[in-house]
Image (cartoon, rainbow, N blue to C red):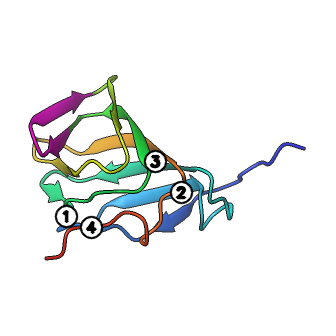
């Protein structure tokens, strides 16, 4: 039987500025550990700690430009583009350019604070 998600759960985000995470599917909103799907809205100047997650993260940028830093390069993922960050790879997301960024993130298995492995400050 299909499962209808009537509204997301707002999740507190890591980073230097407030970022909105609307989780539709995942450990909090749908009690799913297999997948998480969330819409993110990050303000200009937002940056989160680096991480080495235990999940693959598929990201589709809906609006603006998301900057993705890896151990080897810095990638600008522009509106209408997507990126896949493979599990075990170090990555850091930020929105350094003018304007906010909106994107959809899909994590397999689901995101959790326990499996994201953020850098210690």
35 with respect to 40 (left or right): right
Disc 4 to disc 3, how far (Cα)?
Answer: 20 Å
Is 42 situated above or below 80? below
> Where's the C terminus, which quadrant?
bottom left
Which label's residue is closer to the chain start, 4 or 2?
2
Which numbered tag is attached to residue 39? Answer: 3
Disc 4 to disc 2, how far (Cα)?
Answer: 19 Å
Disc 1 to disc 3, how far (Cα)?
Answer: 19 Å
Crowdedness of circle 3 by 10 Å Cα count: few (<14), some, many (20+)?
Answer: many
22 with respect to 120 (left or right): right
Helix, strand or loop: magenta stretch: strand
Which label's residue is closer to the chain start, 1 or 4?
1
Question: Of discs 2 and 1, which sits in the foreground?
Answer: 1
The reply to whether callout 1 and callout 3 are in contact (CB within 8 Å) is no
Considering the numbered disc 1 on the image, is that residue within a helix, a strand or a loop?
loop
Residues drawn in magenta: 67-78
Which label's residue is closer to the chain start, 1 or 3?
3
The reply to whether callout 1 and callout 4 are in contact (CB within 8 Å) is yes
Considering the numbered disc 2 on the image, is that residue within a helix, a strand or a loop?
strand
Is 99 situated above or below 92? above
Q: Residue furthest top?
A: 80
State the residue position of label 2: 23
State the residue position of label 4: 118
Which numbered tag is attached to residue 63? Answer: none
Q: Quadrant of residue 72?
A: top left
The residue under the point 71% across, 53% down is: 6
Question: Of discs 4 and 3, which sits in the foreground?
Answer: 4
């Amino acid at each position: 039987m299909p499962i209808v998600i009537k509204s997301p759960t707002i999740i507190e985000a890591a980073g230097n500025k407030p970022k909105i995470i609307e989780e539709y599917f995942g450990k909090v909103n749908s009690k799913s550990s297999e997948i998480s799907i969330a819409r993110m809205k990050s303000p200009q100047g937002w940056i989160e700690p680096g991480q080495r997650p235990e999940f693959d993260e598929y990201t589709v940028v809906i609006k603006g430009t998301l900057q993705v830093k890896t151990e080897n390069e810095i990638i600008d993922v522009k509106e209408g583009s997507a990126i896949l960050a493979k599990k075990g790879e170090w990555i850091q997301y930020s929105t350094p350019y003018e304007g906010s960024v909106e994107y959809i993130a899909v994590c397999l298995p689901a995101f959790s604070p326990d499996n994201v492995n953020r850098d210690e400050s």
